Image (spheres, rainbow, N blue to C red):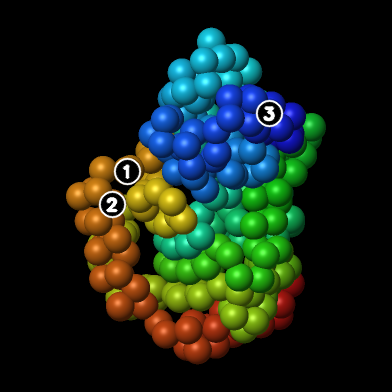
Amino acid sequence: MTSTYGDWLKQQRETAGLTQQQLADMAVMTRSHISHIEAGRRIPSKEDARRLDRALNTGNVLSSFLPTEDAAVADYFEAARLFERQAVMIREFALSFVPGILQTAAYARAVLGTPFPRVSEEECDRRLVTRLGRAKILDDPVTPVVWALLDEAVLRRQIGGPNVMAEQIMHLVRLGESGRIQVHVMPFTLGVHPLLSNMLTLMWFEDQPPMAYGEGLHMGKIHDTPSVVQDLQHRYDFALGNALPLKQSLALLRATARDYERHG
């Protein structure tokens, strides 16, 4: 999002003689949300933009000229991607692949270059840029807090070959050893667990209720109904309670990476 949209919103607010809090009250939003939009850190939803238009008496300007981004992601993931950037805490469960924000370039390219359906090299490069761009949220040493709960299948499924896997797993080890993420492995010996049927992302925010995102083949869904989100959080907590502790998980990751290095 360029700063132009946020700058224009700020100009209209100040012209109307409103503080951020006053505008937030009129538009049924939070002051921090207004602040993030004006600073260019967030893109308002269409409904938020319509409420801002009504509050500022700007017709449909704010709702009609919402900024767009040239991001190569599936349509059903776009909303989740935007929320991911706003989250102060993210808890991931991965069943088959390393979560996107934790992928190395080589691993991500191997995932995105899957043989079906085939995509051009140019399209693969576009998707790779977007995928690696998502990982930049980890550049901040504190926020968001990230937990990664990985089914052991994530480690055993060779994506891109042994060298790619060794590099990817050691990337997780470094993030875990540095304290930037919490990583836990759910071993095969555990058998059935509450998250076995899907991948799941739980997100918490500064100024809005938590939400969840689940994804399957050609589909993804944002869950914001409190009872549903709470159920998914309980499932995650139950599964996490049966996963390997951090120290043991890191030991398993290192041992698995060494195995791949030997075969590579």
Q: Is residue 95 above or below residue 54?
A: below
200 or 252: nearer the viewer: 200
> Mark 3 Cα within 10 Å, few/some/many (few <14, many 20+)?
few
Q: Above or below — where is 243 with respect to 35? A: below
Residue 162 image label: none
Q: Residue at x 42, y 85 (%)?
A: 245
Looking at the picture, which amino acid does disc 3 mark? Gln
Q: Quadrant of the N terminus?
A: top right
| Cα distance between the residues tagged 2 and 3 | 37 Å
Residue depicted at 32% across the width and 43% down the height? 224
The image quadrant of residue 194 is bottom left
Q: Nearer the viewer, residue 56 or 221?
A: 56
Residue 133 point in image, percent of width and height: 70, 49
Please provide percent x and percent y for residue 221: 38, 38
Which mark is drawn over residue 11?
3
The amino acid type, in three-letter code, at marker 2 is Val
Q: CA distance from mark 1 to mark 2?
A: 6 Å
Q: Residues within 10 Å of mark 2 (few under 14, many from 20)?
A: many
Number of the label disc, if any, that sits on residue 229: 2
The amino acid sitting under disc 1 is: Asp
Q: CA distance from mark 3 to mark 1?
A: 32 Å
